[in-house]
Image: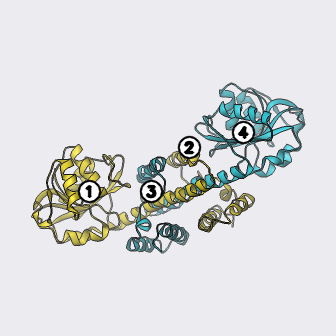
Chain colours: A cyan, B yellow
Amino acid sequence: MDVVLIGAGNVGTVLGRTFKQVGHAITAIWNRDSEKAKQLADELGTVAVEDLKELPQKADIFLLAVSDKSIQEVAHQLTITAGVLVHAAGAVSKEVLQGVSNDYGVIWPMKMIRSHMSSLGSSAIIIDANSASALQVIESLAESISRQVSRADDDKRLQMHLIAAITSNFTNHLYHLASDYAKEKEIDFSLFYPLIEGVIAQIKVQDPEKAQAGPAFRGDRVTIEKHRSLLADEPVLLKIYDEMTQSILHKFGHQ
Amino acid sequence: MDVVLIGAGNVGTVLGRTFKQVGHAITAIWNRDSEKAKQLADELGTVAVEDLKELPQKADIFLLAVSDKSIQEVAHQLTITAGVLVHAAGAVSKEVLQGVSNDYGVIWPMKMIRSHMSSLGSSAIIIDANSASALQVIESLAESISRQVSRADDDKRLQMHLIAAITSNFTNHLYHLASDYAKEKEIDFSLFYPLIEGVIAQIKVQDPEKAQAGPAFRGDRVTIEKHRSLLADEPVLLKIYDEMTQSILHKFGHQ
């Protein structure tokens, strides 16, 4: 397929690389900061344009990989005569693309993408489209780079985006708080990697509910108070500790 | 080494199997519910005793693998003439063993252990002892079943236990809440496994702080409000959502 790349940030860069690797052609690249567009165009053997109006008006796919709040504004500067316009955002309605192209939709890779990645790698991709023909093109593109492609409309995709935030951003924040605490106490955080990996291995074979353990799960208030006393000088972590502990106590009937 | 096993729950069972696999001898097993002691003794080719007083008085290691709140009480019923007495708890002082044996300490596997496991597998083990000679025996036993053995005194071990609760029990609780929500919305939770595994892969190569992403990290209040509106009928999850979001906003200077 011919792909026009609009945006050369993390997502545009890594999807551009991935598309090229599986045999698609990137026919042009635009980015607000044109220096970045040129760099990526050099890497992918294509051309960078400075003005959105200079982009090809025909392609199989126009991939809008810009920040959530710029999607609508950039989309409405495009002049597309043929092709499917897609954005790559989990929490933005596909309808912000309405009126720019007859065929439009979404291709959302459920992964934290950083520009240093050489390709997308393992990731579920959630797609949507406004028409059967657009869906066919988007599905084919998504299946060329992922084995796990699912369709979800705007509402369902936003629910998935919420679940993604809870399971990745929030868990990462717990690791962040815990590793800061470990640093302060001169404890090697890498000691906890096998434990952390064990949790993931568990939830893949049984419901997380059945995999729960620990003092709050057991209603062990003696140990909870020992932990809380360690956190007397750590108000941020203590607040999170209490909130999570209350929620676990509640879920397992200890209140 | 000769090991006497006191307690045939999850930890006693799995450590018993692991010790036997690497060539140690389990010379006797006691458990409050003697049926379970008999079963494990049959499996490990040893004898079960009904009364603590019937246990051998000499061994290289007496492993007390009972619940945190029973450790002290059970320990003080033992009659040990030679050998190192250890418990396996992260949040209990080694000093509860004082007066039972000259040599005592702790061997705490940092892992959620379930009795169905055929062996301990990959796990950091934290050890402590009251004497150089006890430490040598405990270290040698721990190193026979794990490549990651560290020493930590009571205070340090309790700090580690807190970090373990945050990084495993709390993250698992987030998976629990998220998978309940996914079930309710008929979303396949396995879609999120690559995302979750990606978080773990990231924190092993860079600080969790540097791996953070998502709406709260970006200070994206539009998306946060979209998520919050989805949770209008989910008070438990909304409370956790708000607490984690506030903490991330705060950490990354958006307040």
Q: Quadrant of the C terminus of chain B?
A: bottom right
In front: A65, or A80?
A80
Discs 4/3, front: 3
- Crowdedness near tag 3: few (<14), some (14–19) or many (≥20) residues, C-alpha within 10 Å: few
**Residue A236 percent location from the top left of the image:** 56, 69
Q: CA distance from mark 1 to mark 2?
A: 34 Å
Kindly indicate whether the residue at mark 3 contacts the one at mark 4 (C-beta within 8 angstroms): no
Instruction: Read off the residue under disc 1.
Output: B12
Mark 4–mark 1 distance (CA, rounded to whole Å): 52 Å
B50 sits to left or right of A252: left
Q: Is label 2 or label 4 in front?
A: 2
Give the percent coordinates (x, y) of residue A158.
70, 53
Reading the chain from its start, which is encountered first: label 1 or label 2? 1
Whole-angstrom CA distance, mark 3 to mark 2, is: 21 Å
Residue B169: percent from left, percent from top = 46, 60
Q: Chain of mark 4?
A: A
Q: Which residue is mark 2?
A: B194
Give the numbered dot on residue B235.
none
Please check whether the numbered discs 4 and 1 fall on a single chain.
Answer: no
Q: Amino acid at mark 4?
A: Gly
Location of residue A168 with respect to A139 vertically, above or below: below
Is B229 or A116 nearer to us in this picture? B229
Q: Indicate the chain on which mark 1 is placed.
A: B
Quadrant in the picture for residue A230: bottom left
**Which structural element holds mark 2?**
helix
